[in-house]
Amino acid sequence: MKLSEYREIIRPRLSDYRYRHCVNVAQQARHLAELYGADPQKAETAGILHDIMKDTDPEEQLSVIQEAGIMLSEIEKSSHKLWHAISGAAFVKMRLGIVDEDILKAIRYHTTGRAGMSLLEKIIFIADFTSAERDFDGAAELKKLVEKDLRQAILEGLCYTIRDLAGRRKTIHPDALAAYNEILLHS
Ligand SMILES: [Fe+2]
Ligand SMILES: [Fe+2]
């Protein structure tokens, strides 16, 4: 399928803000793929689809997760914000027939990251932070950083997530901590 077809699929499922975000993430993902040597088309596809379930009712998300035979961990059950990544990957596999494991994983892990991320997964993780409309504290610096140092930018993204969650006394998914530790220890 082409980008324009995926746009049509996500449009009615998302708010205006979220739709714009997905278009921007797709564009940033393509740019970063060209910059760092990943497949630009896969990056664009994963980018446009990464938040496909973000505005979907939690109950419906859970039923997609269940249909895919996925068991949520205790932390995943407690953190509703993680559901859209899990249900999103399941949805595009089951309903859109996407079979590329790299694209599926990029969607699945875009919120937490994980140890052993592929280049495509890293690009989607950080494109989500650095898309054009992002304006959180430090967004401008992160957009600059990702142009010259992918590793450092991902580390900053993970720090932002971990700090934010700890600051709000929320649980932190072990995949996020594993991604953070791996960067410090092995790259
Ligand atoms: Fe997301
Ligand atoms: Fe997103």
Image: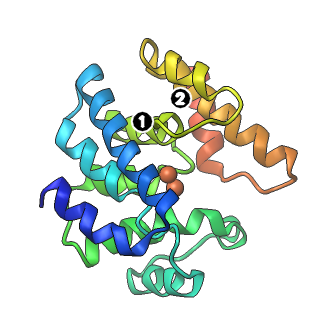
Q: Which residue is mark 2?
A: 154
Going by the numbered disc 2, the residue's amino acid type is: Ile
Asked if residue 186 can be seen in this view, the reply is no
- x and y, in percent, of residue 88 in the image: 41, 67
Name above or below for residue 81 compared with residue 62. Answer: above
Q: Which residue is mark 1?
A: 122
The quadrant holding residue 181 is top right
Give neighbour class at mark 2: few <14, some 14-19, many 20+ (Cα, 10 Å): many
Q: Residue at x 45, y 69 (%)?
A: 14
Pick out the residue farthest to the top: 148
Q: Which mark is residue 156?
A: none
- x and y, in percent, of residue 84 in the image: 51, 67
**Is tag 2's residue or tag 1's residue first in the polypeptide sequence?**
1
Residue at disc 1, secondary structure:
helix
Pick out the residue farthest to the front: 16
* Cα–Cα gap, marks 2 and 1: 7 Å
Circles 2 and 1, Cβ within 8 Å, touching? The answer is yes
